[in-house]
Structures are given as C-alpha cells and as structure tokens.
Image (cartoon, rainbow, N blue to C red):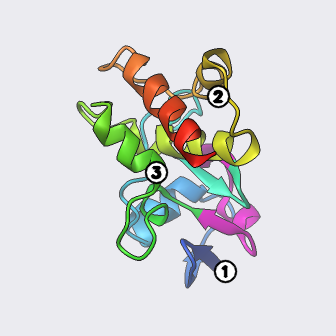
C-alpha cells in the first residue's frame, strides 16, 4: 500500500492506495466522488471522465499514482460559490439530462473543449464528446447546450 495526496476540486486528500488502483476507483470508492461513474471500466464509455491538470482524462484507465501532485476536477468541482458553471446551466436549459449517467463525463469533456477553444463548430463539439456514450438523448441537445455555453462565455 502507498500513501498519496490527491487534490480534487481544490481540496487535498491523503489516501492509501495500491499501485494498480485506478483514479476512478479511488475517486468513487475512497473519496466519495460518486459523480465519477464506472460505466465500462475499459475506457469506452466516457462516464468516468474528469479533468487532470485541465485535460479530459478517462479515469478508469489512469492509475491513481499518476494523478498525485496534479489538479483533479470532477463535475462537482465545476460549480463555484454555490453557482452552477455555464455548462451546467446550459445542460439543464437544453434538457440534456435524461437518465443522467453520462452527464458528469459529458460536462467534463465539454469543459476541456471550451477551455481550449471557445469558438466551436458543431463538428468540433461532436468530435470532442465522441468518447462519451449517451443512450438516452441522441446527442443533439447536448451539442446545442455546449454551443450555447460557448456563445455565452465569449
């Protein structure tokens, strides 16, 4: 077992892990960040997407020891001072949430995209979220919500 320090949503946590624990496992099971979903545990569905130093990462494929010393952001970390992030607001306004299972991962993929390119085409949005599977919405509302967030954040 190893003791490591993780910084998640601005808070530092000391946690005991094995070298083979994934970031998704530790975030959910030891630290209680249940918005990080373990959908496939193969890196195919995107439901466990978080930001690591601002980049979208499939956390079920990342060993937790690789995250030590890095800034980890989950969907809960998007809201600041009790106010929803623009993406969260637009996801609600555009009725993107049906079952909600994919929503945290979609939000994080969208956040990474907006942080790097606020001038988005529909095609760029679709490419950016292509690693996130949604079985409910058909994606159109999600694409529209991300485009609306990009337009408002300019």
Q: Quadrant of residue 120?
A: top right
User: What span is in magenta?
Assistant: 56-72
Lower sequence index among marks 1 and 3: 1
Location of the N terminus by quadrant is bottom right
Circle 1 sits on which residue? 4
- Please name the residue that numbered disc 2 is placed on: 128
Q: Does the magenta portion include 51?
A: no
Name the spot of residue 147 as percent of width and height, x first.
53, 30
In this orientation, which residue lies closer to the viewer: 92 or 29? 92
Q: Which residue: 65% across, 42% down?
A: 114
Image quadrant in which the C terminus is located: top right
Q: Nearer the viewer, mark 2 or mark 1?
A: 2
Please identify the quarter of the rendering in which residue 122 is found. Answer: top right
Neighbor class of circle 1 (other Cα within 10 Å; few <14, some 14-19, many 20+) is: some
Q: Is residue 77 left or right of residue 90?
A: right
Q: Kindly state the secondary structure of the residue where label 3 is placed.
A: helix
Q: Is residue 39 visible?
A: yes
**66 within the magenta span:** yes
Q: Which residue is mark 3?
A: 86
Other-residue count near label 3 (Cα within 10 Å), few / some / many at <14 / 14–19 / ≥20 = some
Marks 1 and 3 sit apart, C-alpha to C-alpha, by 33 Å
Reading the chain from its start, which is encountered first: label 3 or label 2?
A: 3
Q: Residues within 10 Å of mark 2 (few under 14, many from 20)?
A: some
């Amino acid at each position: 077992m190893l003791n490591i320090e993780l910084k998640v949503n601005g808070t530092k946590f000391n946690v005991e892990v094995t070298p083979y624990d994934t970031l998704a496992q530790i975030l959910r099971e030891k630290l209680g960040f249940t918005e990080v979903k373990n959908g496939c545990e193969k890196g195919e569905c995107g439901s466990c997407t978080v930001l690591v130093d601002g980049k979208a990462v499939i956390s079920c494929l990342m060993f937790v020891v690789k995250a030590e010393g890095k800034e980890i952001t989950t969907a809960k970390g998007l809201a600041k001072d009790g106010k929803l992030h623009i993406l969260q607001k637009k996801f609600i306004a555009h009725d993107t949430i049906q079952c909600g299972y994919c929503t945290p991962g979609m939000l994080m993929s969208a956040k990474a995209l907006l942080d790097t390119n606020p001038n988005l085409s529909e095609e760029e949005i679709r490419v950016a979220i292509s690693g996130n599977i949604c079985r409910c919405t058909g994606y159109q509302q999600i694409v529209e919500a991300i485009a609306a967030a990009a337009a408002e954040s300019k």
